Amino acid sequence: MSEKTSSSSINSLANRESDLLGRIESVPFCKWHIKPRVIIGTATFFDGFDSLSLAYALPVLIGLWKLSAGQIGMLIAAGYLGQAVGALMFGVIAERYGRVFSIKISIFMMSIVGLACMFAGNFEVLFVLRFLQGIGLGGEVPVAATYINELSRAEGRGKFFMLYELIFPLSLMVTAQIGALIVPSLGWKWMFLIGGGAGLLMLPLFFKLNESPRWLISKGRFDQAERIVEDLEAATDIRVPVTMTVSKPKVKGNWKELFSPFYRWRTLVVWILWFSAYFISNGLNNWLPSLYKTVYNLSLEDSLHAASLTNIVQVVVVIVCALVIDKIGRKKWAVGAFFVAGILLLALFSNGATSAQSVMFLGSSAYGVVGSITVLLYLYTPEIYPTRMRAIGTAFATTWLRLASAIGPMLIGLILNAKGISYVFIVFAGVCIVGSLVASRMIETKGRALEDIAP
């Protein structure tokens, strides 16, 4: 093949790639986008349910199995350590075999092992099962976030994605309400039965999903991408002008590129943000039911209802965030949210966290505000990486949330035993300060095509 012919072939492929990406950007959000958002939303819902189910089983298991504070922290940590492994494992699968394939396997795994948790008869068995379930849990959410981002166009992507991701805090809220109702009357095993059983029932829906056209394009599978884009265009006659450049050089993806000069600071910033936000949010979310019962001596039913308030606050704040994020921007929201949460946690420390009521008000408010950042990061992280490494980049970042979620609960147990409850909140406030400073180094992504943000 002559050099001229080779150059012509490369230009032809580049033009086709640019054309397909431009056509994706030119179609406004319509009914075509609803189907994948709803189906993926069901997976995200049960991911949230399964991740929090242990927190509402623990107040019973503490008495049943005579668990120490250290064992409680280890049980909580087990799931998140598994999620760290799962995020990396399924991130690699998503880059190699596709987003949808990876999501289906992760859902199957987390549901099967979730059902097995019902039959755990002691601490050791449940520890192992939660770790294994965590592998599936950790694989679903980051790949799902990548998939939904890749179906989105630049204008309005923040609102579109955040309303989808609202499913996760809604799941936590519903889990809290179901836990408060079910556990005292029917027992802790029902939490795992509902999560695992529902996940398996929903699995057939995921065989109806199209693969991400952006992923297909990145792999040179233009004919398959063309058919999906044609389906998208057939859903509406409306077209919007594409004002940004959507073409990009053809580069083979490699995880090492996360640490290249162009991407290394983006990578460092999001890693710290993921760690900071989830250190606080999952530390609080997983411990609060047990804290209300053991520290503040509330009844089991009152403890579970009090803990459920945190998730209600988060849903409200995330709705507000979804409505304004495309106007305010990702950076300003993250900086402000970390700062506000830090003030609330400092106030809780200053009054000594002397009552359950102060924790319900200040602690729940702080959790709700930080909880909006945890959702925002699922929007922001896939935005800052190119399609060739978007899933693995998001997977690496979410590994830090899993580590933070494992370290946080264990650290709370140690601080609680050594210093008392108020010192737990000063540690959280310090992490908020770090998060706010690091968030100021974010790049702004609102209104920009994914291919412009990350060439």
Image: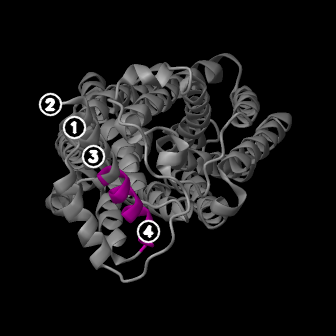
> What's the distance in space between the residues labelled 1 and 2, CA to CA?
6 Å
Of marks 4 and 3, which one's residue comes earlier in the chain? Answer: 3
Label ID, residue 13: 3
Q: Which residues are magenta?
A: 16-29
Of the two numbered discs 1 and 3 in the rendering, the one whose residue sits closer to the viewer: 1
At label 3, the amino acid type is Leu
Instruction: Identify whether 165 is placed above or below 114.
Output: below
Residue at label 1? 5
**Do the residues bearing badges 1 and 2 touch, measured as CB atoms within 8 Å?**
yes
Residue name at image x 55 percent, y 34 percent:
274
Of marks 1 and 3, which one's residue comes earlier in the chain? Answer: 1
Judge the density around disc 3: few (<14), some (14-19), many (≥20) Cα neighbours within 10 Å: some
Which percent across, then down, holds residue 23? 37, 64
Seen from the viewer's position, the closer of residues 201 and 448 is 448
> What's the distance in space between the residues labelled 2 and 3, CA to CA?
16 Å
Instruction: Identify whether 403 is placed above or below 54.
Output: above
Q: Secondary structure at mark 3?
A: helix
Seen from the viewer's position, the closer of residues 291 and 208 is 208
Q: Is residue 168 magenta?
A: no
Q: Is residue 325 shown left or right of residue 212?
A: right
Residue at label 2? 1
Of marks 1 and 4, which one's residue comes earlier in the chain? Answer: 1
**Do the residues bearing badges 1 and 4 touch, measured as CB atoms within 8 Å?**
no
**Do the residues bearing badges 2 and 3 touch, measured as CB atoms within 8 Å?**
no
Of the two numbered discs 1 and 4 in the rendering, the one whose residue sits closer to the viewer: 1
At label 1, the amino acid type is Thr
Q: Secondary structure at mark 1?
A: helix
> What's the distance in space between the residues labelled 1 and 4, CA to CA?
31 Å
At label 4, the amino acid type is Ser
